[in-house]
Amino acid sequence: MHAPISHFDASVTRADALPEPASVLSLARDGLIALTAFLTVVDLFATQAILPSLAQHYRVTPAAMGFAVNASTLGMAIGGLGVALIARPIDRRLGVLVSLALLAIPTALLATAPGLGSFTLLRVVQGLFMASAFTLTLAYLGEAYAAAAAASAFAAYITGNVASNLVGRLISAGLADHLGLAANFYLFALLNLAGALLVFFTIQRAPRLSAAVAPAERPLATWAIHLGNGPLRATFGIGFCILFAFIGTFTFVNFVLVRPPLCLSPMQLGLVYLVFLPSIITTPFAGAVVRRAGTRPALWAGLAVAGIGLPALVAPSLAAVLAGLVLVGVGTFFAQATATGFISRAANTHRSAASGLYLAAYFTGGLVGSLVLGHVFDGVGWSHCVMGIGLALLLAAVLTIALREPHSVTALNCMRWRPSEDVQAPMPRGRGRRR
């Protein structure tokens, strides 16, 4: 095992010491968190860059191929709920490692999928394993970091997610254009295995949960606790709307870009996703903005930026469409980082279950967005699809009104969360030394 500085486990820092945001240790930790996220979800949206090629290969409509490619979000939703049910006894490190190793199997099999049905099923299986790794990592971060550090850790994780959207699409488009569709999936299977190796060498194993510290509860009772929490429930809805809008934008814009008057080639279509570069720069600031301004202003800012970009998506100019995609990417990723961090603070107990429920809502939004907006795109066109995206962003902004910062956040800024605890233990009173 490497020296503690190479791990992104928060327990290496003294409980009474505040982390130095610009320190080498903090930067190294955030870099490892981002790289882990990158290798966890690099398969999720990379295939969108080759949607027109896949639709031609399987000889299906844009809506049918869009649903098949985004069927991974169904697996993500089911996997998120499954992990929410059984996450408590699972060793976080082992769970993430095994999930990423198994993810390589359906990824490689996509190279030889004989029909749209088998392709769709394999994408669902991919989603199951990605959700398991994603949810357990989020639970680990929520348990291992104090509230002040957790916002930056979650922002780093979402930044890795952003990078996977960019780099994954570039790799997928380039490989499919030069070496064919099969080579694309084989390389991504190797990236899945690389993620498992990274987890093996960088994540420390957390101690098992103590029954005395965290008494067992029935999973459905835990769900009821979280669903009865108004701010958490609103955040689940916000996550649904964010991915609904994101999927609707970055799935069906591909078909707009390859048709007249824009007529981009597959490789040019891959380069379009350089629009995610600004998001890689802006997303890490989500944690700092939340600490300074609060969750609601941060979410409203992200959603507003995304909304401002929507009118440009229907313009007949490539430059305008690219500018719109930049704004939608910056806004939705910023909002996603903010909402994900809020879950870890608003859930006073069973953070793994709260993360699983959020991801289930989030990825269900992606699947519904793909299905509903796909039919809108095929039936009445891109401009109506963009209107549906705008309504989803507006609903997310309305739901944000229900959010409020937990009362314990200020106190938690000055203490360290212990990785072995999955529940909030009450702070002792009157235990200080007598003078």
Image: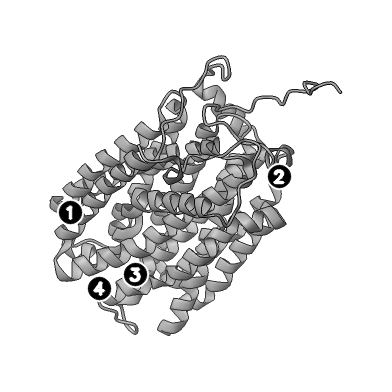
Q: Position of residue 177 (x, y in %)?
A: 19, 70
Q: Which mark is residue 405?
A: 2
Residue depicted at x 59% and y 68%: 305
Q: Please report whichever mark, 1 or 4, sits nearer to the chain's N-terminal start.
A: 1
Q: Name the residue carrying label 1.
A: 186
Q: Secondary structure at mark 4?
A: helix
**Residue type highlighted by circle 2:** Glu
Q: Mark 2 and 3 residues: CB-CB less than 8 Å, in contact? A: no
Query: Which amino acid type is marked by label 4?
Result: Pro
Q: Amino acid at mark 1?
A: Tyr
Task: Indicate left or right for 164 with 222 as reference.
Answer: left
Q: Amino acid at mark 3?
A: Asn
Q: Determine crowd level at label 4: few under 14, some 14-19, many 20+ residues with C-alpha closer than 10 A.
A: many
Disc 2 to disc 1, C-alpha distance: 44 Å
Q: Between label 3 and label 4, give the one nearer the viewer.
A: 4
Above or below for 238 versus 49: above
